[in-house]
Amino acid sequence: MSHVELTVLGAGNMGRALMGGLLRHGMRPEQIAVGERQEAARAALSQELGVTATADNAAAIRKADVVVLAVKPQDAGSVLAPLAADLQQRQTLVLSVAAGIRIQALQSWCGAGVPVIRAMPNRPALVGAAVTGLFAGPEVDESRRAVATQIMRSVGEAVWVATEDALDVVTAVSGSGPAYFFLLAEAMARAGVDLGLAPDTAQRLAIATLHGAGLLAQGSDGDLARLRAEVTSKGGTTEAALRTLQDAAFEDLIARAVAAAARRSRELAAQAGGTGS
């Protein structure tokens, strides 16, 4: 990444997280330009990150090898379409983190031949602990895929999926996933209070358990069933709790929840005009 010129269009949470991650991983501030229409945000970026920000998107992308589209989905077309001639001339890689906007729609705004990659990071990018699903069509070469991987790994892990439809499942599993764990931790803390713990004690126990379990899983070989079994002594407290969850069809409930999120992701893409169909 030492020679890559990068522009971020949109300096919201995800755009800022990516810039911060790239700077922590060795990219220099002078390699990053930002297109941002809000004056206060531009001033903050200059002061906090040392990057150059402008309200003129065309000026921001002038030297870019990669343009990261980090605007709201409903703004994607109006931001990209005026830049099409410049993007086509330089064959600039467009890496979109705009949720739900399909590659066909992105390419229609960017113009013929512009390489486009979609990325679906999740909110832990704000603390450098994201996981991102990536997809590109067969016309995008390996060198550009490698650059996109490096960019997204600046805020966590990155995995490629085989089809664009799979990004809806990525959204359901990891994009929405943090909220599932937060809900579980909330319920655990509330149950602790109901059983006699002080509220702040119950909350600290639930949050620390959430954090510790994540670290154990992250440092393992990925066999979640084995990790669960290692915590579950025969005839013990954990087994009693898990039996209660299984009797209540917990796994089926989670499967239905994730399916609902994936279905909603497809619906939102259609509403945004991002299906390309």
Image: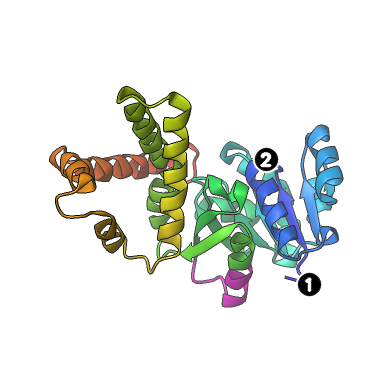
Residue 119, position in %: x, y? Answer: 54, 56
- Residue found at x 64% / y 62%: 151
Label drawn at residue 50: none
Q: Which residues are magenta?
A: 137-147
Neighbourhood count class around disc 2 (C-alpha, 10 Å): few under 14, some 14–19, many 20 upward:
few
Displayed quadrant of residue 93: bottom right
Look at label 2 and name its amino acid. Gly
Residue 161, position in %: x, y? Answer: 43, 64
267 in the magenta segment: no
| Residue 240 visible in image | yes
Displayed quadrant of residue 146: bottom right
Looking at the image, is 205 positioned above or below residue 171?
above
* Residue at the spot of label 1: 3
- Residue found at x 82% / y 45%: 48
145 in the magenta segment: yes
Looking at the image, is 46 positioned above or below residue 186?
below
Q: Is residue 209 left or right of residue 14?
A: left
Nearer-N-terminus badge (2/1): 1
> In this view of the protein, which residue sits in the foreground, 201 or 116?
201
Looking at the image, is 46 positioned above or below residue 133?
above
Q: How is the image coloured?
A: rainbow
Residue 138, position in %: x, y? Answer: 49, 71
Look at label 1 and name its amino acid. His
- Residue found at x 75% / y 59%: 23
- Dot 1 lies on which element? loop
Q: Is residue 122 left or right of residue 169?
A: right
* Residue at the spot of label 2: 12
CA gap between label 2 and label 1 equals 25 Å
Displayed quadrant of residue 226: bottom left
| Residue 168 visible in image | no
> In this view of the protein, which residue sits in the foreground, 34 or 104?
34
